[in-house]
Amino acid sequence: MTRRLTVALTGNTFTRPVLDGRVGIAGVEPTLLSYHPSELFWRQLHFAEFDVFEASLSTCFRLASLGDRRFVALPVFTTRTLCHLGIVVGERSGVETPADLRGRKIGVPEYQQTSAVWSRGVLQHDFGVDPAEVHWYMERGAAHSHGAATDFRPPEGVRVDVLAPEENIGLLLAEDFLAGSLLYLSEKNLVDRSPDRSEAELRVRRLFDPEAERARYLAGGTGLHATHCVAVRRELAEELPWLVLNLYSAFAEAKAAVLADVRTALEPWRLLDPATTAAGEALAATDPAPYGIEANRPMLERLAQYVAEQGIAVRKVSLDEVFAPQTLDL
């Protein structure tokens, strides 16, 4: 017997083999759904539509700190990046270094979102810019925000204004009202409303030189930032004791299939340029975004610190409060 479950994911590199049915989930007959992350997270937090779903890591930490046990997370980190490399600043803003953000108006789609947590944490701990020194402007109002669903309030001393419904980050960047934004989301979905414009059209540039900052940051040992994980309704995880590890195995298999595809795709180049191809094959043989707790403990502990410091979580939570007990030794 299999269990019919709704599985809602974003269409990213590592989830695609599950979404397209190439990799199945043992014991599960899934209804597979794909959404933009902004919409997916909003729908699950406000309406709890899905059984298994991709979730915002910062929201998982917040819910755990509140004692909200509706969902349980798996250490399957479907997106990995360096979030602060996405910070943009206006070409005419006069912002040249992170220190120049002090006292300025900076946009953020959602104050609670994990990417923003990572970027503020790096700005604070690596460059000395405290969140209270910046005037934040959030694009999402109560009807579409994660924070409204989790009763988030900015901590004392941090100013967060919400944009009017007719305003958006893109418009205010182009008009030089905002000096920058922690990130810019323009893909069409039911939540975000900034227009799809290039950085040139918005008259913005990246705050950090990507190559120099990547090298500096990764030398510190935290690794790539995780922003999403897979989560499941807790009642299902308890009712079906096999579900958590079957899900974990399926997503691990999906990632392995993606990495194998990379190695296969290099085969034609092996004949043309063996030396260069060998380097690519060696790189593809590594896992740049491991799943599990132990391989990611420094990164996860850093995120737990940041969400508590920034008031996203009402207290610092331990990892065993967030992740399913079956996964804690993985």
Image (cartoon, helix red, strand yellow):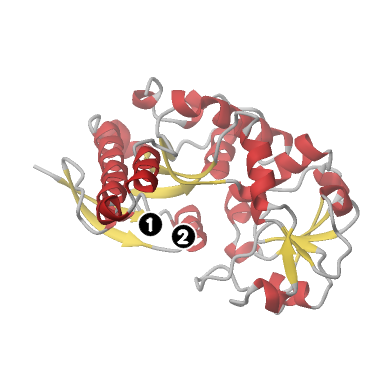
> Going from the N terminus, do you reach mark 2 or mark 1 first?
2
Element type at marker 1?
loop
Q: Is residue 194 above or below residue 317?
A: below
Checking the image for residue 254, the label placed there is: none
Do the numbered discs 2 and 1 sit on residues whose CB atoms are within 8 Å? yes
Where does the image place residue 216, in percent across and percent down from the top left? 68, 38
For the residues marked 2 and 1, what is the alpha-carbon distance in whole angstroms? Answer: 7 Å
In the image, is 215 to the left or to the right of 258? right
- Under circle 2, the secondary element is helix
Give 24 or 160, whichever is nearer the viewer. 24
Amino acid type of the residue that numbered disc 1 sits on in the rendered structure: Glu
State how many labels appear.
2
Disc marking residue 49: 1
Q: Position of residue 234 (x, y in %)?
A: 37, 37
Q: Find residue 43 and name its label.
A: 2
Q: Residues within 10 Å of mark 2 (few under 14, many from 20)?
A: some
Q: Is residue 161 left or right of residue 239?
A: right
Residue at image location 43% in from the left, 40% down from the top:
71
Nearest the eye: 99 or 144: 99
